[in-house]
Image (cartoon, helix red, strand yellow):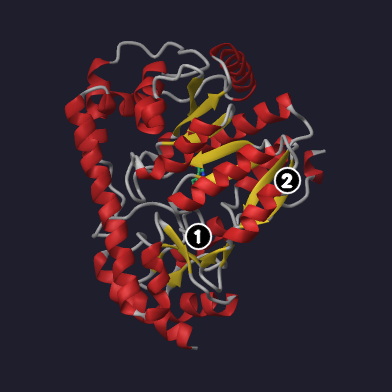
């Protein structure tokens, strides 16, 4: 009976949002949730997106069904942004999905259909939602060490050793850039070694690229993905526009599949379209249509790149500010994207919440761009106080 369902342990991040909302202190700082905030502390709609939505409203003549692959022009326009020099390779095919999450679920379902015994190698720590997504599809997870939180460093040798000892056919889940939750990205030299290990062991690389353009730049953030494409017969990539276009709730993403030949990619595409049909049938249109309108005109596409650069610059300048304020926070300047992890105990995280009205995940992960300019000094001084213990 439905009444017999076991209680669900609430996502601790959602519980944190509720706690923060209930806090009456007016200077509270919410660095738990993962959305970009501007200098005023708000998450506005990008100008290019707002304009595209207006245009969409005025010109859209029907809302009749699209196909299971969603807006094909949207995917086509993303192709060069994501694939760079490989954009012309028709053995790489993409389809629109409901956000990066939709792409991840679809990718793992495809893997399960092709090789039910494949194991998925997942770095520790990773974005917490990776775990239930992979388990939900029925694939086995094998963890590999990724980041030492207290040493503030990537455990690269251990990561490489784990990849090198994996079974041929295993899946290597890799974050393209702006690693969530740590902000610790592989250098280009490290990517080169990871690619070698993936090729040597015959692993299937599965790249999660949810923050392209928010780290070093659009091309720089795709370095690892493109290097894998250049060297591997088969690659999967789950992409999201939700952050780099700021369309979080509109659920805009895509899944990309490379196989050795156009024919087998087409078969893989047809397989994922059937899998999509069984879940959401087709992805929601609105956000992808807005992104398509932005990218379809060189002038608005250039304006998006500027707005994106503005977000990236703000993230990186805040990182520099944290690092300059306290030597114990220096590592933050070497990291990328919206998150870093502070080496705090659970008690210290609680102290920040109770004494300083600063809300972050128990893991010490915080959204570096989660506060207004005015709140930065208070944030840094509270963290320094708590770290000094
Ligand atoms: N992958 C990672 C690493 C993420 O951080 C996120 C979003 N938090 C996603 C995928 C999913 O993004 P979306 O909101 O587009 O589903």
Residue 131 visible in the displayed image: yes
Residue 24 visible in the displayed image: no
Percent across and percent down for residue 102 are 55, 33
> How many marks on residues?
2
Residue 193 in the figure: left or right of residue 217: right
Percent across and percent down for residue 195 are 55, 42
Secondary structure, mark 1, is loop
Residue 182 is labelled as: 1
Q: As displayed, is residue 227 above or below residue 361?
A: above
Residue 27 is labelled as: none
Percent across and percent down for residue 235 are 56, 31
Which comes before the other along the chain, label 2 or label 1? 2
- Label 2: few (<14), some or many (≥20) within 10 Å? many
Residue depicted at 41% across the width and 30% down the height: 83
For mark 2, what is the residue? 166
Give whichever of 276, 270 is nearer the camera: 270
Residue 265 in the figure: left or right of residue 250: right
Give whichever of 32, 128 is nearer the camera: 128
The reply to whether the C-beta atoms of the residues labelled 2 and 1 are less than 8 Å apart is no
Query: In front of the other: label 2 or label 1?
Result: 2
């Amino acid at each position: 009976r439905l009444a017999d369902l076991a209680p669900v342990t609430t996502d601790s991040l959602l519980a944190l949002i509720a706690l923060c909302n209930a806090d009456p202190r007016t200077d509270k700082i919410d660095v738990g949730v993962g959305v970009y905030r501007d200098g005023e502390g708000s998450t506005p709609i990008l100008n290019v997106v707002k304009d595209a939505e207006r245009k969409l409203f005025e010109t859209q003549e029907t809302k009749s069904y699209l196909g299971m692959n969603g807006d094909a022009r949207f995917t086509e326009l993303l192709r060069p942004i994501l694939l760079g020099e490989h954009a012309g390779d028709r053995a790489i095919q993409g389809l629109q999905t409901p956000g990066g999450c939709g792409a991840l679920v679809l990718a793992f379902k495809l893997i399960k259909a092709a090789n039910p015994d494949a194991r998925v190698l997942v770095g520790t720590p990773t974005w917490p939602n990776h775990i239930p997504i992979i388990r939900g599809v029925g694939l086995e997870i094998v963890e590999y060490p990724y980041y030492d939180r207290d040493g503030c460093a990537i455990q690269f040798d251990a990561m490489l050793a784990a990849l090198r000892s994996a079974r041929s056919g295993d899946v290597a889940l890799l974050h393209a850039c702006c690693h969530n939750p740590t902000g610790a990205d592989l250098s280009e030299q490290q990517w080169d070694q990871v690619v070698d290990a993936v090729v040597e062991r015959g692993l299937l690389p599965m790249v999660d690229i949810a923050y392209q353009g928010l780290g070093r730049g659009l091309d720089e953030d795709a370095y690892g993905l493109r290097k894998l494409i250049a060297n591997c017969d088969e690659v999967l990539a789950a992409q999201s526009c939700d952050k780099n276009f700021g369309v979080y709730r509109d659920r805009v993403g895509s899944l990309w599949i490379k196989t050795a030949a156009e024919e087998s990619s087409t078969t893989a595409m047809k397989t994922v379209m059937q899998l999509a049909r069984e879940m959401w049938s087709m992805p929601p249109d609105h956000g992808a249509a807005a992104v398509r309108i932005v990218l379809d005109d060189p002038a608005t596409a250039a304006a998006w790149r500027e707005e994106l650069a503005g977000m990236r610059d703000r993230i990186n300048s805040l990182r520099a500010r944290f690092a300059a304020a306290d030597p114990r926070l220096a590592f933050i300047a070497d990291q990328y994207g919206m998150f870093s992890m502070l080496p705090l105990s659970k008690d210290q995280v609680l102290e920040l919440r109770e004494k300083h009205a600063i809300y972050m995940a128990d893991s010490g992960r915080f959204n570096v761009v989660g506060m207004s300019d005015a709140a930065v000094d208070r944030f840094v001084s509270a963290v320094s106080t708590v770290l000094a213990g």
